[in-house]
Image (tube, grey):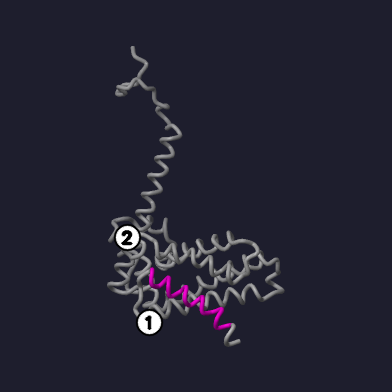
């Protein structure tokens, strides 16, 4: 009787009935992760389609999951609320910014460090693949058209501001409870980006590359304005 398991013409033994080898486990984990990412993006795309077609407030989670043919339970694996479908896409950019700032040279002054970190985010936006570029454009359109999402955007700015100010304080070796400068410099930076995004919306500019260029121009203008006007 052969020791080779039935159905294996190669003569190689398997790693066992109840388990996989490390390479198989890694491949399966990668497959599961890609499937989860596809589901998440499908939910975002379906939600954005519905938000733009009939309005954010008028769209229900039931409609979103029906469009993707998944359950509400699946939706809540990826998003805590309907709002998260929109804001989570931008929160990823906040994470890129935070990581870029932490990696800046320690001797770099705070505002230049913020500006150079912003360039990393803007490159990420401008160089994203066409599908991500389209999502960025539609997310911005939905936010600008929805007062409740504008409020959520302000909350996101506040959370981002606190995280950035904390990092600036760490870099400069100061205590934020006693020194307002980290929060002040971050406020200048975030105000410039907010003004630039709003200006793009007013002029109906949604292309990620163009938006990125406009934001960079606005932040550059801050230092010039401070020198000339203050």
Up/down of 84 relative to 1, above or below: below
Under tag 1, what secondary structure? Answer: helix
Q: Which residues are magenta?
A: 209-226
The quadrant in which the C terminus is found is bottom right
Dominant secondary-structure state across the stretch colored magenta: helix
Q: Are marks 1 and 2 in contact (CB under 8 Å)?
A: no
Q: Nearer the viewer, residue 160 or 133?
A: 133
Q: Position of residue 134 (x, y in %)?
A: 33, 65
Q: Earlier in the sequence, mark 1 or mark 2?
A: 2
Q: Nearer the viewer, residue 23 or 192?
A: 192
Residue visible at 38% across and 58% down in the picture: 75
In the rendered structure, the answer to whether residue 100 lies left or right of residue 72 reads right
Q: Quadrant of residue 162?
A: bottom right
Residue visible at 45% across and 78% down in the picture: 196
Up/down of 46 relative to 8, above or below: below
The numbered mark at residue 65 is 2
In the rendered structure, the answer to whether residue 39 lies left or right of residue 154 reads left
For mark 1, what is the residue? 202
Q: Is residue 178 magenta?
A: no
């Amino acid at each position: 009787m052969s020791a080779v398991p039935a159905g294996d013409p190669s003569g190689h033994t398997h790693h066992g009935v109840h388990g996989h080898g490390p390479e198989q486990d890694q491949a399966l984990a990668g497959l599961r992760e890609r499937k989860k990412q596809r589901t998440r993006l499908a939910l975002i795309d379906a939600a954005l389609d519905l938000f733009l077609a009939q309005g954010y407030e008028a769209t229900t989670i039931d409609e979103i999951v029906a469009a993707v043919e998944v359950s509400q339970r699946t939706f809540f694996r990826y998003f805590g609320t309907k709002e998260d479908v929109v804001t989570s896409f931008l929160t990823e950019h906040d994470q890129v910014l935070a990581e870029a700032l932490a990696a800046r040279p320690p001797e770099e002054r705070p505002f230049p460090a913020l500006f150079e970190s912003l360039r990393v985010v803007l490159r990420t936006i401008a160089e994203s693949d066409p599908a991500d570029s389209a999502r960025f454009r539609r997310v911005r359109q939905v936010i600008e058209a929805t007062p409740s999402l504008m409020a959520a955007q302000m909350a996101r700015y506040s959370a981002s501001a606190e995280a950035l100010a904390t990092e600036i304080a760490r870099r400069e070796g100061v205590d934020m409870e006693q020194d307002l400068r980290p929060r002040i410099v971050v406020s200048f930076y975030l105000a410039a980006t907010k003004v630039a995004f709003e200006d793009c919306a007013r002029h109906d500019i949604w292309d990620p590359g163009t938006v990125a260029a406009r934001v960079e121009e606005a932040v550059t203008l801050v230092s010039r304005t401070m020198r000339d006007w203050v």
